[in-house]
Each structure stands twice: as C-alpha cells, then as structure tokens.
Image (spheres, rainbow, N blue to C red):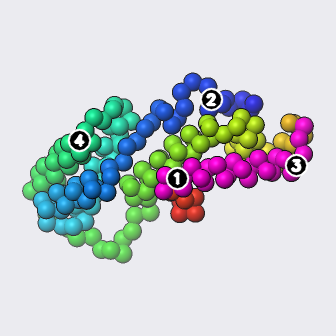
Amino acid sequence: MSSRGSLGEGQSPAHALTLEYPDAALAGALRRFVQSRLDHHADGDDVVQETYLRLFAYQATARVNDMKALCFAIARNLLLDHHRASRRSAHVELDDAIVCQQPTADRVLAFRRAVVIMADALERMPPLRREIFLRKRLDGLRTDAIAKSLDMSMAAVEKHVVRAFQDLRGALAKRGFTMEAGA
C-alpha cells in the first residue's frame, strides 16, 4: 500500500456523507411553490438552487426525517429574505451575454454526489485492483513500475486498471451518472 492510506481504514467517505436528493415530484412541487410567489422566473430558479444547497449542507451534518417539510421551510425562509431584499433595492435585469464561469449549484452538487458514489465503488473493489488503480491514477506511477513492484505482468496491471474504470462507470451509471457527461 502507498503512504496515503486505504479507504478501508475507519469510516468511508460514502458513509460519512449520505445525500438524499429530492425526487421529481418534490422538485416539481418546490419549483411551483417558489415560482408562484415570485415575479421573475430566474429568481425562482435561484431560490430553488439555494434551497438544494442548504438542504445538502444540512444533510452533511444531520439526518433529515422529513425532506419535503425541510425543503419547503428552507424555501419559505429564502423567499422571505428575497422579498425583504427586493424592497430594499430595485430589481435590475442582467444581460444574458454576461456568463458566470463558475459551475451552477446543481452541477456542483452532482459532482459531489458522483464523488461519494465513486468513493463507495473504490471501497468495494478488490484490494489489489483498488491498489493498482490508485497507484496508476492518483500516484501517477507508470504501468511497468507498478508491475515490477507487485511482481506482476504489465498486461495484468492494465487489466486491473481497465476493470477498475468499468467498476467506477458501472457504479455511476447505476445512479444515473456518466463519466462522459461530467456527472
């Protein structure tokens, strides 16, 4: 094993952070609830995204018993804050040509979920496959160096790397993610 440690030691990242994502029915109801209380459609999207961010931040620290109630409570509070802020300042439309280079909040959340899924898949891999994959992809070691240190053929090392990628892609696909789509 390399000096960075193993995912098997202690608690796994997948168990340390369990994110429950609102289902389509809840997401639709939340969007309608927010949109019906705002004048501008773009503001509603922002409130819904901020609701998800706060929901996932809360889930990282505590168990959520009633996701629907929590989502609507967060959204209600955000709507109150939005209405207070809009009374203090006039609404200014931004030009669509101005594009933020940062990823959207839902894209960040998708990447976080993908990381948890991949960490869990790595933990479930056979130890030798995981070790070879981590040496190759994380440590950046060459295939011949890994083969020599483990007294294996280069072909065997390459097969372990290919199978590790298959395991990761399969775990992501099972949860609706693809590596090509970037989570």
135 shown above or below 179:
above
Badge 3 density bin: few <14, some 14–19, many ≥20, Cα 10 Å:
some
The local secondary structure at tag 2 comes to loop
123 shown above or below 79:
above
Write down the residue under mark 1.
174
Is most of the magenta stretch helix, strand or loop? helix
Whether pointer 2 and pointer 4 mark residues with C-beta atoms closer than 8 Å, the reply is no
> Toward the viewer: 151 or 91?
151
The local secondary structure at tag 1 comes to helix
Upstream in sequence: badge 1 or badge 4 = 4
Residue at (69%, 48%) from the top-left corner?
A: 164
Q: CA distance from mark 2 to mark 4?
A: 33 Å
Residue at (45%, 36%) from the top-left corner?
A: 17
Residue at (72%, 29%) from the top-left corner?
A: 3
Q: CA distance from mark 3 to mark 2?
A: 26 Å
Upstream in sequence: badge 2 or badge 1 = 2
Of badges 3 and 1, the one in the foreground is 1
Q: CA distance from mark 1 to mark 4?
A: 27 Å
Residue 120 placement (x, y as % from top left): 56, 39
* Farthest-out residue, top: 10
- Identified by mark 2, the residue type is Gly
Write down the residue under mark 3.
154
Residue at (62%, 41%) from the top-left corner?
A: 122
The local secondary structure at tag 4 comes to helix
Upstream in sequence: badge 3 or badge 1 = 3
> Toward the viewer: 100 or 125?
125
Residue 130 placement (x, y as % from top left): 70, 39
Upstream in sequence: badge 3 or badge 2 = 2
* 90 with respect to 63 (left or right): left
